Amino acid sequence: MSETASSSGAANLYLVGFMGTGKSTVGRQVAQRLGMNAIDSDHEIERRAGMPIAQLFAEQGEAAFRALEREFILSGHPPYGQVVSCGGGLVLQDGMIAALRARGVVICLTASPETILRRTETNKNRPLLNVEDPLRRIEEMLAQRNPVYRSAGTEVLTDLRSLPEIVAHVLRVYRREARSFSASRS
């Protein structure tokens, strides 16, 4: 049973951050606890494009993928009652943080480069990490992206914490910020 009565009218929750920080796993758990729908933006894009992201990158390039991400956020999902796990690069696009904030609460999940590598090293569907030294690539990408991630929303560290602890922290942040979000819409 969910902790909230109904997801109708509930502010969307957008989980952002680097790949391997736990957005999809945490998103599913949080959605279940809130009685909301869980959506993974990458999975939705794959479904709509009819191909895996790695193939989309290879055949159409990163720019085409980023355009599909933008389209998904701007018009590809319901306006409330959703927990959306966003792709790691989504918030790097101009205007996307503002677009997410206009649609709900934004929480950024974070983890160390070593944790990210451990969580992603067996998944070959991560085209940006299919390089000779993935840890170095993660460190380089985080150095570039962290300022944007930090500005996106409240940060929740996922290193050395159990899934229930992370979920509880995200729920506390969401509830607090959803009240502010709803009040600003009134």
Image (cartoon, rainbow, N blue to C red):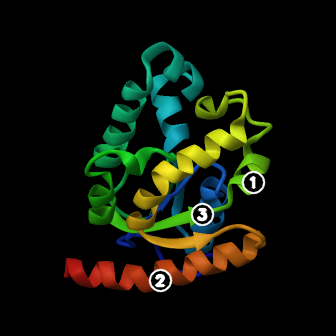
Q: Which residue is mark 3?
A: 110
Residue appearing at x 72%, y 34% in the figure: 133
Report the front residue among 102 and 127. Answer: 127
The kind of residue tagged 2 is Arg
The kind of residue tagged 3 is Thr
Secondary-structure class at tag 2:
helix
Mark seen at residue 25: none
Secondary-structure class at tag 1:
helix
Question: In the image, is residue 3 above or below residue 68?
Answer: below
Secondary-structure class at tag 3:
strand
Disc 2 to disc 1, C-alpha distance: 30 Å
Residue 161 drawn at (x, y percent): 76, 73
Q: How many marks?
A: 3
Residue 3 drawn at (x, y percent): 59, 81
Q: Which residue is mark 1?
A: 114
In which quadrant of the rendered image does the N terminus lie?
A: bottom right
The kind of residue tagged 1 is Glu
- Position of 54 with respect to 65 (left or right) is right
Spot the residue most to the left.
Answer: 186
Q: Which residue is mark 2?
A: 175
Which numbered disc flags the more N-terminal residue, 2 or 3?
A: 3
